[in-house]
Image (tube, grey):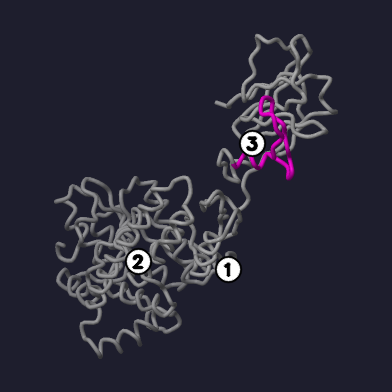
Amino acid sequence: MTEGLDLKLLPRGGLVLCAVSGGADSVCLLRLLLEAAPGLNMRVECAHFNHCLRGAESDRDEAFVRSLCARLGVPAHFGRGDVAAFARENGLGTEEAARRLRYDFLERTADERGAAAIATAHTADDNAETMLLNLARGAGLRGLCGIPERRGRIIRPILGLTREEVEALLAERGEEHVEDSTNAADDYARNRIRHRAVPALESVNPEFIRAARRAAALLRRDEEFLDGLARDFVEKHPEGLPCRELCELPLPVSSRALRLASGASLSEAHVAAALSLARGEGQGSLDLPGVRLRRELGRLRFGAESPAELPERALLPGGELPLPEAGLTLRCSYTVYSDEIHSSLNTFFFQCENICGTIACTPKRDGDRIRLRGRGCTKKLSDLFAERKLSAAERALVPVIRDEAGPIAVCGFGTAERVWPAPGEKALRVDVIKNK
């Protein structure tokens, strides 16, 4: 740390986009970044988003940032949005709507400018308030860690500074800032925490903000350890989480493994339901937020809520049938079958007179059975797929060629004995071609 700035977060030789509202914290961050820039061969630019929530005061803040950047010689970028309208249209609270619009602007500006990092001015006070808010809402260990110092390319270089220290640094530099009048009101939960809970805790421990900073560091250490165990487990099993092993893990690890593997925000109730599915028998599925969990062949696999499936299409001789869902094309032609022509699991020959009615390409249907040539027995397609350990998503994309009596070929498995041609007989040939 140099003057409270966490240098390890800063991109040497790169561009940092500094989010500046005009408040004390962001003005301090901008000044510290500019002071550190020469030694790191780093460039600094500013971004300001006008939320248009406070009328003339919002415009005053924008004008202040314009003047500040002009005086400091910092390239600046400005955006604005109708937060109130966005909140109404998307069913969001004002704070969340403002946050989404602001970060969308910052990310877009960073992309346009080629910024390596976006720096925001969160402080130790913000971190303590976030910890208390999350505690009040019943958060787990991750929420109690507070604000991470880095998330993607968003960095918080003054997260270790208290608000008191920020004000002292500004006073040393003779820098002014603007005040957001809404910070004095108790309309928002964070303000109530700041005005009531924090002073009460400081009456118990005057160094509460610094104590919360230490507690967050200790909690984050434990969180990173548990996350590492979960990540190792998930990466060890890319084909799906083995149910027995998952259920034997300590709950803090198994719950993290499920959240990591699903890529979804799973509640404790969702985790409990997923573990219940893992402890069950046979196959089953569970719809979770934005994802479907399937138990197949002793493993839990995550996929789309509605897995892709082949549509049913007629198969016409003399043409091609593209199957983009499976990345395949079926090519049909007539030929005279000969022993010198060899069939394969993806080249089929059907004796024309033994085909019942029209033929089509479909996904597997419930109860489908086939007697494959050379197998000597009739099997359910579901059993054939289980032998190959295909997931439900994979099964849905296996092309099944059928006539009006049932399946006559299964791509990757072979041809039905009942339609196999003898040498010299007219046959329909179907080649399965992988799309490039």
Q: Which residues are magenta?
A: 364-386
Query: Is residue 93 magenta-colored?
Result: no
What amino acid type is highlighted by mark number 2? Ser
Q: Which residue is mark 2?
A: 21
Q: Which residue is mark 1?
A: 91
Which callout, 3 or 2, points at the residue further toward the start of the chain?
2
Q: Which residue is mark 3?
A: 398
Front-most of residues 328 and 7? 328
What amino acid type is highlighted by mark number 1? Gly
Residue visible at 74% across and 44% down in the picture = 367
Disc 1 versus disc 2: distance between alpha carbons? Answer: 25 Å
Frontmost of labels 3 and 2 is: 3
Disc 3 versus disc 2: distance between alpha carbons? Answer: 55 Å
Which callout, 3 or 1, points at the residue further toward the start of the chain?
1
Residue 384 image offset from top left, x and y in percent: 63, 38
Residue count near mark 2 (Cα–Cα under 10 Å), binned few <14, some 14–19, many ≥20: many
User: Dividing the picture into quarters, in which one does residue 220 lie?
Assistant: bottom left
